[in-house]
Image (cartoon, rainbow, N blue to C red):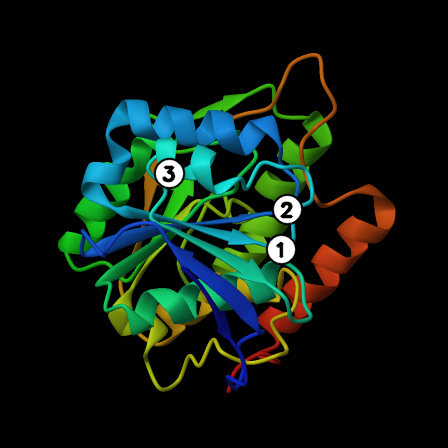
Amino acid sequence: MTETITGLTGVPDYTRTRFAEKRSDYCLLIPIINEGGRILAELDRAAKAGIPEVCDIILCDGGSTDGSMDPAGLIARRVNTLLVKTGPGRQGAQLRMGLWEALQRGYKGILTIDGNNKDSIESVPLFIQKLEQGYDLVQGSRFVKGGRAVNTPPSRWLAVRFIHAPLISLGARHWFTDTTNAYRAYSRAYLTHPAVQPFRDVFAGYELLAYLSIRATRLGLKACEVPVERAYPKAEPTPTKIKGMRGNANLLQILFAALAGRYDP
């Protein structure tokens, strides 16, 4: 049965279709829009690796029209819940929708990953292990020991390693190596901390990712990195929603706003 969720402060309107009951203390949020075969391949990898046994998979769809969100296919791939955003906003709104749903259902920890099949979804247990050890922010990194960066575009590699990661680390007062990577985990304690307040309309696009990278350690919470693989296709266009000079300029603008504390409550 599909339900309509409306009128929540700081959360976009959305519809919810639950295919199964809550089965785990942890969930994996996957924000997507028109990822087509990439998200289906990612879900197939997850099922093969046994990920649905260790966390519930929740898709946070921005309004896909490519047929990839067909319920029968999602049930076959052991997706727990499909959320479809009907209100305004982009990736940040999709994440707020998913975070709200996850907190309302009582999950102890919440993981996020992109839905374009670039990341090693098989690494999910590493994040859960760190959450169980008491970490509040667990950042996936292709650049730490055990991680793998495959076919990373040189411009992307340079921007992450020499601009984004050093600046985020400076703001967080904690060294991070792969800060544009949305493959992460958050503790319930972090997301519900009164000085965090993620359910605000200012987090429409990539603002929430930058903010949550910095805020945890500024509040004295525990953060760490775990090794992951991020593989870009070798002979295909780079699957990304950040495109061109305008997209990168917007990312830098968000980064500096986060460093200045403009997203703090």
Q: Is residue 25 above or below residue 234?
A: below
Q: Residue 238 occupies which quadrant of the picture?
A: top right
Q: Position of residue 64 (x, y in %)?
A: 65, 47
The kind of secondary structure element at disc 2 is: loop
What is the number of callouts on the image? 3
Q: Within 10 Å of the Cα at label 2, are there few (<14), some (14-19), or many (20+) other Cα atoms? A: many
Q: Within 10 Å of the Cα at label 1, are there few (<14), some (14-19), or many (20+) other Cα atoms? A: many
Q: Position of residue 56 (x, y in %)?
A: 28, 48
Q: Give me the residue at 60% from left, 42% from top.
A: 160
Q: Give the residue at mark 3.
A: 75
Q: Position of residue 207 (x, y in %)?
A: 61, 66
Circle number at residue 33: 2
Locate residue 53 relative to residue 183 in the image: left or right: left
Circle number at residue 62: 1
Q: Quadrant of the N terminus?
A: bottom left
Considering every residue shown, the one lying at the far left of the view is 133
Q: Earlier in the sequence, mark 2 or mark 3?
A: 2
Q: Give me the residue at 50% from left, 87% from top.
A: 265
Question: CB of mark 2 within 8 Å of CB of mark 1?
Answer: yes
Q: Is residue 5 above or below residue 32?
A: below
Instruction: Report the amino acid beneath label 1.
Output: Gly
Locate residue 233 relative to residue 227 in the image: left or right: right
Q: Earlier in the sequence, mark 3 or mark 1?
A: 1
The kind of secondary structure element at disc 1 is: loop
Q: Give me the residue at 31% from left, 33% from top.
A: 123
